[in-house]
Image: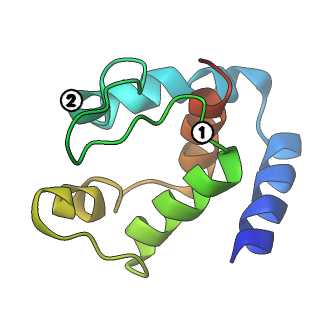
Amino acid sequence: MKNKMIGLFIAVLFILPASALADGKALFKSKGCSGCHGAMGAKASGMIPQLMGKDVALLQEKLTGYRDGTIKSKGAMLMNNKMVKSLSDEEIVAITTWLAGHQ
């Protein structure tokens, strides 16, 4: 799965224009991620992890897993499965690239 995500990341980097990657921050907010993870993905409390500065491949693997149902959330984290259902591969790459790129 990790190799697939790295391949997807590299492939999409060549397909997406630079402006699409810049939209990662806007997508993070518009898709509702910032409600729990904070505007910059830095909010870490209790069960809510900090996302900014994390490894891009790991973030992509997790988001894709939540979206596809291969990773199941429990309790309060169940929201992850519901919130990422509508994300495309390109949106996942844009969001995770943005998150991984700032600290």
Q: Position of residue 63 (x, y in %)?
A: 47, 58
Left or right, residue 18 beside residue 82: right
- Location of the C terminus by quadrant is top right
Please tell me which residue lies in front, 69 or 50.
Answer: 50
Left or right, residue 15 beside residue 97: right
In the image, residue 38 sits, relative to residue 46, either above or below, namely above
What residue lies at 28% left-to-right and 65% top-to-bottom? 81
What residue lies at 31% left-to-right and 26% top-to-bottom? 43
Residue located beneath label 1 in the image: 54
Q: Position of residue 12 (x, y in %)?
A: 78, 49
Left or right, residue 14 beside residue 52: right
In the image, residue 14 sits, relative to residue 41, either above or below, namely below
Determine the image quadrant of residue 37.
top left
- Location of the N terminus by quadrant is bottom right
Disc 1, SS: loop
Q: Residues within 10 Å of mark 1 (few under 14, many from 20)?
A: some
Residue located beneath label 2 in the image: 35
Q: Amino acid at mark 2?
A: Gly
